Image (spheres, rainbow, N blue to C red):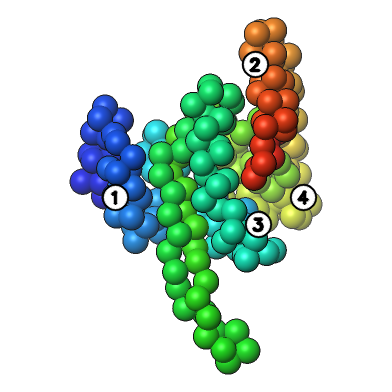
Amino acid sequence: MDEILGRLEKLKKNGSKMKYDEMLLDLIPYLKYFQYVQGGEGKAYFIGKDYVVKEYSKSFDMDLFDKYFETYCREIQGFSKKELVVPKIYSWNSIPQVVVKRSTPRIQYNYYIMEERIKGRPIFSGLMEDVFHLCADICQEKQFNNVVFNPYMDGKLYNEIVKRYIDDYILMNRSIESLSESDIEKFVMSVYQMFEEGENSSPDM
């Protein structure tokens, strides 16, 4: 792991597309050892402080994914080079695997994108059951989960969790409100430009 992180540090200073392609292929077998978040289409692994590897292993239409994956990555990479507000994409690849459906084997791909890790945090924390990170100093994760789903277990703790959840929501609204006009304009114009020019992607607000 230390060797991988050391190689990534060197890539920051002198990374070509070919070197990033090699790095992504080397990383794939070790992704399970990194912290990740999971969504509807796959996982995003946090590789050190500067990189994310996205693994797309589920999609409502994998045939469509097969067709447009390459052009999608090139399009997003182009938006990044124009300095629009999207992460830089360093490398991408698709890895075949054999899956059996209804006793019939077929080739299916897992798709990987290695991209810039955006500094900061998600704008909002989501559902209350997802905010343990705001409460790690006052309870264990198991206790947190039990109380969130059954407030009568510990009303005092539940009230404190709710307070922190609301305070965080207010804090992020204040942060958004305090953004400069130029930052807001860049964001809005980037989204507009990607809507206008995008042929294989749509901006994720």
Instruction: Give the residue pinned by disc 4.
Output: 151
Instruction: Give the residue pinned by disc 2.
Output: 186
Q: Nearer the viewer, residue 35 or 143?
A: 35
29, above or below 173, in the image: below
Q: Label 1: how many residues lie within 10 Å, few (<14), some (14-19) or many (20+)?
A: few
Residue found 52% across the figure and 44% down from its top: 73
Q: Which quarter of the figure is the C terminus placed in?
A: top right
Q: Nearer the viewer, residue 115 or 124?
A: 115
Question: Is residue 44 in view?
Answer: no
Label 3 to label 2: alpha-carbon separation: 29 Å
Mark 1 in CB contact with mark 2 (< 8 angstroms): no
Instruction: Give the residue pinned by disc 3.
Output: 40
Instruction: Give the residue pinned by disc 1.
Output: 22
Question: Is residue 75 in view?
Answer: yes
Single out the residue that lies furthest toward the top: 181
Residue found 53% across the figure and 80% down from its top: 106
Point out residue 68 in the picture as x, y percentages from the top left corner: 59, 53
Mark 4 in CB contact with mark 1 (< 8 angstroms): no
SS category of the residue bearing label 3:
loop
Q: Nearer the viewer, residue 40 or 34?
A: 40
Counting residues from the start of the chain, the first of labels 1 and 2 encountered is: 1
Label 1 to label 2: alpha-carbon separation: 34 Å
Label 4 to label 3: alpha-carbon separation: 29 Å
The amino acid type found where label 3 is placed reads Gly
Question: Which is closer to the viewer, label 4 or label 1?
Answer: 1
